[in-house]
Amino acid sequence: MAIKRNADKREIMNYLIGLNEIKDIPYEAYFMSCNLDHALYNIIDLDDDLKTAYADAFYEKFIGKEHLFKDFLEKDVANGTPDTKKASWKYIKEDLHSVERHTNLHIYFKEHLLPSGML
């Protein structure tokens, strides 16, 4: 059952990765580790009570300093992920990288320059 589920997910993601738009709306796919807790805090399956504490600490770390978020993703979470979308998706599909701590979300911020003072 899990093998079929994972194969189905892989097939759907491969399809989505190849899209540039959905119904004339621009579309891009990015990944963040096996779950958000793992990506942001390097903890898998964080206890529900601790999720709030970690979320509050995360908020405090970046409130008013949103520009630091891209650097955090690139330096602390990307964890060796290649620096282009195509290469990063190839990388995350190899070996056991999909269950390790990785993201390619920092590439979004590099490719979509925002006005000064923003990410």
Image (spheres, rainbow, N blue to C red):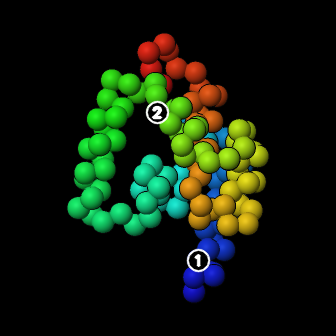
Look at the picture and state if 115 lies above or below 69: above
Tell which tag, 2 or 1, sits nearer the viewer: 2
Q: Looking at the image, which residue sits at the far bottom?
A: 1
Residue 73 image position (x, y, % from top left): 53, 39
Q: Which residue is mark 1?
A: 5
- The answer to whether residue 45 of the structure is visible from this angle is yes
Q: Looking at the image, which residue sits at the far top?
A: 116
Residue 90 image position (x, y, % from top left): 75, 54
- Distance, label 2 to label 1, CA atoms, is 33 Å
Residue occupying the point 46% across, 33% down: 69
In-image side of 50 versus 115 (left or right): left
Task: Assess disc 2: are there few (<14), some (14-19) or many (≥20) residues with their C-alpha within 10 Å of its C-alpha.
Answer: some
Residue occupying the point 36% across, 32% down: 62
Residue occupying the point 44% across, 15% down: 117
> Identity of the amino acid at label 2?
Phe
> Identity of the amino acid at label 1?
Arg
Depth check: give the residue in front, 70 or 115.
70
Q: Which residue is mark 2?
A: 69
Residue 59 image position (x, y, % from top left): 31, 38
| Residue 35, numbered label | none
Task: Assess disc 1: are there few (<14), some (14-19) or many (≥20) residues with their C-alpha within 10 Å of its C-alpha.
Answer: few
Residue 107 image position (x, y, % from top left): 63, 36
> On the rendered image, what quadrant is the N terminus found in?
bottom right
As helix, strand or loop, the secondary structure at mark 2 comes to helix
